[in-house]
Image: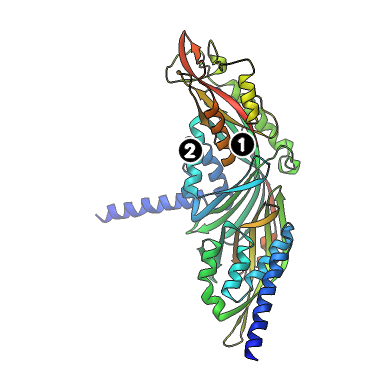
Amino acid sequence: MIIKKTYVVLIGLVISTLMSFGQSTPIEACDDFFNSLSIESPTISNLFTRGAHITSLVYDSAGLPQNKSFTPAEFQTQIQSLSNDFNIDQKPVVLIFRQYQSLASIYCSVWITLTDKETGKTLKSRSIQSLKFVRDSGAWKINHIVIQNEHPNYPIDDEMFPIKLTQPLESRMTQDLSVMPDFSTEYDTNKVYRMEEVDEPPVYPGTDNSLSDLLQSFDVTTQPSPGYTPFIITIDEDGSAYLSYAHDLSGFQISRAESLVRSMLIWYPAIKYAASVKCKLILYIHD
Amino acid sequence: MIRVLIIALALIGFSTIAKAQDADLSILGNLVSEYFKAASVSDLNLRESALSNLFDKQGTMDAVILRQGQSSTLTEGTWGEFVEKSQGFYNSYQVEFEESEREVEYYLDMANVHCLVFQNSKEKASGSIYYQKLWMQFDVIFKSDRWFIDHVIWINESDPYPIQNALLQDTIWHQTAE
């Protein structure tokens, strides 16, 4: 009995030592956070203090900054939702670090890669993040984060993204693309196909200009360009359109994208092997 | 005579707040200076009013209290909760802040401000003065043509570790494993 008790206590000690060892410095806690974001269905709430908040700066249609505040649980939901469609890879690049006893600060540049799980298409983004860390019950936890994504008109200083560090990240993006599996020969009624995979792409009814006029009226384009944020709409087998990915958009952009989709007529759906299939379109809305 | 004195005191109070509101908060330095002024106001309502002008609606205010044995306690909450909870302390002490050093990192509409500050607390009953050194960090955001405080956190100095070292920064290049 005594042996059993000792055994249980020892296991407890080993587990607690391993847990505290995992976050024994603020830098390790920072690595834990960014590594956790890159796994399938990430769980990150446990890396934060109880009253922690995450503030993200986004821009409205007039280009004016607005801040969104999230609790760790809300932030986790956002990331998990994004990870349904994309493989997320976030890497801190240059970190400016300060610490005094139980409080630490990291101001860092972050390289973000989103790889579409179906198409393999990769979106690159960069940001500056300010993270505060507090030693709480022996482990370092995140107390606050502010995230400012790079604005295309105001690139982040090269000192925060030195070529020596960003080149391996760029080349890894190319490698990732080359190893993506080819789904084009598979047929699945539940699958949402991309435009290149279908035999006949979905067609918007009306004249040749009907779709372009509609997109223009909502300041939306079909090609990426500076100042525009990507989002995805899906055309169902019955031709109805719905917004399927809008996580990068601000609240105002989401409401505009929703209005756009509501304004659409019923499409002629995409065709694959002589059958109507779901198909997705990537569009870009002005910031 | 007493009535005149009360009116005069009230006018001084309102004029202090008016000055705080008049400060050009599109200048980052003014926001930090105004914070220290606002946090020094004794009257609860005036302090609350002055801080509400500086903080974002969702702004938070946290503190790490470090003790001699190097154990620490974290207090977290909104700035409004902090004002409410610190009322007892302000009833007993007249607080003043004196900023000695400041460092800033910023990109576009966010900035990270580090300040080393002396906090002088004069006990109203005895006149005794206590002081401590703090490392304060402000996360501030720019919107509606001015800066707002999104988050502030501080830690107090504890012997034998000089808090001056808090501003010694390390720049770390994160190596990505191939």
- Give the percent coordinates (x, y) of residue A78: 50, 40
Q: Label for residue A112?
A: 1
Q: Dot 2, how many residues are within 10 Å of its Cα: few (below 14), some (14-19), or many (20+)? A: many
Looking at the rendered structure, the secondary structure element under dot 1 is strand
- Give the percent coordinates (x, y) of residue B175: 65, 40
Residue occupying the far front of the picture: A206
Q: Compared to B162, does A180 lie above or below? A: above
At 47% across and 16% down in the image, what residue appears? A277
Q: Dot 1, how many residues are within 10 Å of its Cα: few (below 14), some (14-19), or many (20+)? A: some
Tell me the chain of label 1. A
Q: Do the residues labelled 2 and 1 touch (CB within 8 Å)?
A: no
Q: Compared to B72, does A286 lie above or below? A: above
Name the quarter where the C terminus of chain B is drawn. top right
Tell me the chain of label 2. A
- Give the percent coordinates (x, y) of residue B100: 72, 68
At 66% across and 24% down in the image, what residue appears? A223
Foreground pick, A242 / A176: A242
- Give the percent coordinates (x, y) of residue B151: 60, 57
Looking at the rendered structure, the secondary structure element under dot 2 is helix
Spatial CA distance of label 2 from label 1 is: 15 Å
Foreground pick, B30 / A259: A259
Three-letter residue code for mark 1: Ile
Foreground pick, B15 / A27: B15
At 53% across and 58% down in the image, what residue appears? A135
2 vs 1, front mark: 2
Q: Which of marks 2 and 1 is nearer the N terminus?
A: 2
Three-letter residue code for mark 2: Gln
Q: Which residue was labeled with disc 2?
A: A80
